[in-house]
Image (cartoon, rainbow, N blue to C red):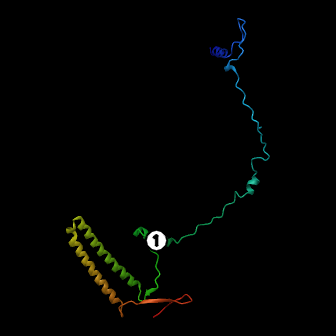
Amino acid sequence: MCLSYILNCHNKEKPNLSSTDGASLPLTPDPTSLPSPAPPQSSKSVRRRLPGKPQRRSADACRSGDSYTREKFCPAPTRDLEKEKRRLQNLMATGQEEPPAASSHSVPACWSPQETEERDQFQEVLDEIEDRRQFLADMASLGQERQYIHIINSEISQKIRELEILEKARDGGQGEGGECKAVDRKHTPDGDNKRED
């Protein structure tokens, strides 16, 4: 059955060339039965390229190049890790980078590590007093000053007493003279710093 269907379809596509009544065939051919025109050949001839050299390289040619040599490792300049740690610790603690150390031309003659500790303690107590005053001002703006005023005022008076004690200890520790003298440094032509007494 399939074969008969294919033959019928094939016969329908071909025009019937045999005439039973003896009439002449049509002068113009059926447009569907015309073969498609061949594309015009271009004027340029397509040149087939024959490879002169093989496309693959030999193993010796591969090895002779610089493909298998490693580049020499050049490390980046290193940083002082301890200095970087201190900088980052300060940045995380205060939110600011520490200012560069300022070189002063006059250095106190009675400078000592103990005195800087006393100054730091003195400044710390002053900061605590200021924090408590700021807290009272904030509570007053919120209308809750009454709850905290007695507690905070007593803490402020304790801090003032601490300041008086630190000041007495500092004045007693300086010895004779009572004041630090600034030492002027003069630069000599050879670059050394000398003190004048």
Query: Up-down: is 105 above or below 8?
Result: below
Question: Furthest residue to the front?
Answer: 27
Is 51 displayed left or right of 147 in the figure?
right
Above/below status of 144 relative to 50: below
Q: Residue at x 51, y 71 (%)?
A: 81
Q: Position of residue 190 (x, y in %)?
A: 57, 89
Amino acid type of the residue tagged 1 in the rendering: Arg
- 42 shown above or below 3: below
* Between 7 and 24, the one nearer to me in the picture: 24
Left or right, 5 with reference to 88: right
Which quarter of the figure has residue 64? Answer: bottom right
Left or right: where does residue 167 sit relative to residue 33? left
- Between 63 and 123, the one lying in front of the other is 123
Alpha-carbon neighbours of circle 1 within 10 Å: few (<14), some, or many (≥20)? some
Q: Is residue 34 above or below residue 110?
A: above
Quadrant location of the N terminus in the rendered image: top right
Q: Who's the residue at 40% across and 70% down the image?
A: 94
x, y (%) of residue 36? 70, 25
Q: Residue furthest right?
A: 52
* Disc 1 secondary structure class: helix
Which of the 4 image quarters holds residue 150? bottom left
Q: Which residue is mark 1?
A: 87
- Front residue of this view, candidates 49 and 166: 49
Q: Position of residue 14 (x, y in %)?
A: 68, 16
Residue appearing at x 29%, y 84% in the figure: 165
Q: Quadrant of the C terminus?
A: bottom left
Q: Residue furthest top?
A: 21
